[in-house]
């Protein structure tokens, strides 16, 4: 299967989440992904984009950033690039997922899920931009 | 995200359909708060048609379960789809929330 690349421009609004999910689904459609693969990638990107909007841009509307999706065989790479102040979402402290109900905090759970659901997640500050790279190799299509 | 409510005796069943993402989760949060405020203490969240949940949705699930518990009530989750089940598992939610194979089993656990 040939490689494919798509650049998706995004703005700093949570209204983008459904459009993001639709774009990810359309981009992955040629792979005939199972529901878990598609869910994992959509979730990781919702968490990452939400972090950019809330932490990076402080929930201010009107900022533009980009998501590049790349497909090589069954490996999907997503690169999120924004010009917000330096912020490494992957550096957040690990959450305690075994705490009892009353003590469960939700902060950091999104990043925890990103790390668990992606094969790799990497952050770098490059040319005054935050660059987050997420990779997941999809399971073979159902026979 | 569509929420369909039904009641069986003192149990309210909320059937969730579609995607519980960061944009949709406030809708469920408000629904749960309104139920608790109106005196409902037993809630089944039927997730059989819920095909997506992110941390924003998990936050609402956790907040709703805590709110019901502190009011002397309980929440029971039912019929998780495989993708949603995986997210519950990775989050440790299977340990702190009551998860049942079907809405009927969830309702029976609250009776």
Image (cartoon, rainbow, N blue to C red):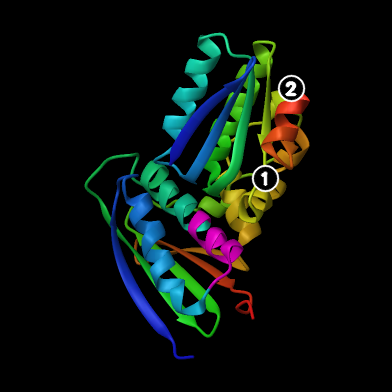
Callouts 1 and 2 in the same chain: yes
Q: Residue furthest front?
A: B8
Residue B93 showing in the rendered view: yes
- How far across and down, in percent of the image, does residue A37 sit? 58, 66
Q: Where residue A118 sits in the image (x, y, percent)?
A: 60, 64
Q: Nearer the viewer, mark 1 or mark 2?
A: 2
Q: Chain of mark 2?
A: B
Above or below: residue A107 compared with residue B86: above
Q: Quadrant of residue B93?
A: top right
Residue at position x 47%, y 16% in the image? B34
**Magenta span covers which residues?**
A33-43
**Which residue is at 37% across, 52% downward?**
A18
* Image coordinates for residue A49, horizontal then vertical, percent: 41, 53
- Check residue A53 in the rendering and tell me which mark sits there, or answer none: none
Q: Nearer the viewer, residue A10 or B60?
A: B60
Sequence-first tag of 1 and 2: 1
User: Badge 2: few (under 14), some or many (20 or more) residues near its Cα, within 10 Å?
Assistant: some
Question: Disc 1 to disc 2, how far (Cα)?
Answer: 21 Å
Residue with the mark numbered 1:
B88
């Amino acid at each position: 299967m040939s490689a494919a690349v798509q650049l998706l421009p995004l703005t700093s609004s949570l209204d983008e989440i459904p459009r993001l999910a639709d774009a990810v689904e359309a981009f992955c459609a040629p792979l005939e992904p199972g529901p878990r693969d598609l869910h994992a990638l959509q979730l990781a990107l919702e968490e990452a984009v939400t972090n950019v909007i809330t932490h990076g841009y402080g929930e201010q509307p009107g900022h533009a950033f980009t998501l590049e999706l790349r497909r090589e065989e069954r490996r999907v790479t997503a690169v999120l690039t924004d010009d917000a102040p330096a912020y490494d979402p992957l550096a957040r402290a690990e959450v305690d997922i075994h705490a009892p109900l009353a003590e469960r905090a939700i902060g950091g759970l999104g990043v925890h899920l990103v790390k668990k659901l992606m094969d790799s997640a990497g952050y770098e500050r490059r040319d005054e931009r935050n660059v987050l790279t997420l990779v997941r190799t999809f399971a073979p299509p159902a026979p | 995200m569509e929420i369909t409510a039904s009641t069986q005796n003192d149990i309210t069943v909320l059937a969730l359909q579609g995607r519980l993402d960061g944009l949709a989760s406030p809708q469920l949060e408000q629904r749960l708060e309104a139920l608790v405020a109106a005196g409902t203490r037993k809630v089944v969240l039927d997730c059989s048609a819920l095909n997506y949940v992110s941390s924003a949705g998990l936050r609402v699930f956790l907040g709703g379960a805590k709110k019901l518990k502190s009011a002397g009530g309980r929440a029971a989750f039912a019929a998780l789809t495989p993708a949603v089940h995986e997210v519950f598992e990775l989050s440790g939610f299977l340990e702190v929330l009551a998860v049942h194979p079907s809405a009927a089993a969830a309702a029976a656990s609250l009776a």
